[in-house]
Amino acid sequence: QVQLVESGGGLVQAGGSLRLSCAPSGLTAGAHAMGWFRQAPGKEREFVAAISRTGRETVYVDSVKGRFTISRDNAGKIAVFLQLNSLKPEDTAVYYCAAHVLYYGSDAGRYDFWGQGTQVTVSS
C-alpha cells in the first residue's frame, strides 16, 4: 500500500523559510516521479513543482521560480523535499505531495498517489 506523508509545514513570517518533506512508503526508490501542489482556502489546487525519477529534471510554476527548490533523495530512506525561501503571504496554503510512475508535470489528474497535506501559513 502506497502512502505519502508530508511534514515540515508551519507558521512563518514573510521572508522566512521552510523545508517540506514527503516520505513515501510502499514505493521503490527512484521508481516514481514526484510533484508538489498547494491549495489555498477558496482556491483550486495549484501546481508548485515536480521532479523526475532520477532527480535530474525539475519544473516549477513561474510564481515560485527562484524561491522554491524541489529535490529528492533516492538513497536509503526515500524522500522528496521542497525548500521554500523568501516566503510571501500568498504562499499560504496546504501543500501536498503526489507521485506518478513517470509523469512530472503540472497536471494533477495524472498523479496516482497523494498525501494528506501540510499547512504552510505565512504572516505579513
Image (spheres, grey):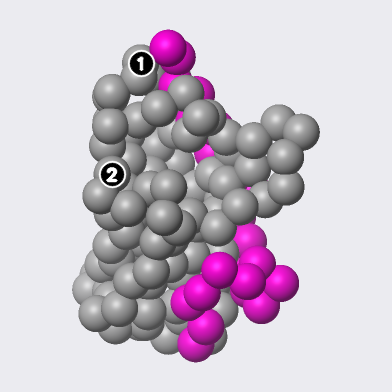
Q: Which residue is mark 2?
A: 67
Q: Residue at x 33, y 71 (%)?
A: 58
Helix, strand or loop status at disc 2: loop
Q: Residue at x 61, y 52 (%)?
A: 46
* In-front residue for pair 26/110: 110
Q: Point out the image quarter for the C terminus.
A: top left
Q: Is residue 98 left or right of residue 1?
A: left
User: Measured from the top left, where is residue 22 in percent x and y?
Assistant: 43, 55
Q: Is residue 66 left or right of residue 12?
A: left
**Mark 1 Cα shell of 10 Å, populated few (<14), some (14-19), many (≥20):** some
Residue type (three-letter) at the residue carrying disc 2: Arg
Helix, strand or loop status at disc 1: strand
Q: Is residue 118 left or right of residue 30?
A: right
User: Measured from the top left, where is residue 52 in percent x and y?
Assistant: 37, 79
Q: Is residue 27 left or right of residue 66?
A: right
Residue type (three-letter) at the residue carrying disc 1: Gln
Q: Residue at x 32, y 53 (%)?
A: 65
Q: Which residue is mark 1?
A: 13
In three-dimensional space, the C-alpha distance between marks 2 and 1, rounded to whole angstroms, equals 15 Å
Q: Residue at x 63, y 71 (%)?
A: 107
Magenta residues, as a range? Answer: 102-124
Q: Is residue 69 magenta?
A: no
**Mark 2 Cα shell of 10 Å, populated few (<14), some (14-19), many (≥20):** few
**Is any part of residue 95 visible from this angle?**
yes
Q: Point out the image quarter for the N terminus.
A: bottom right
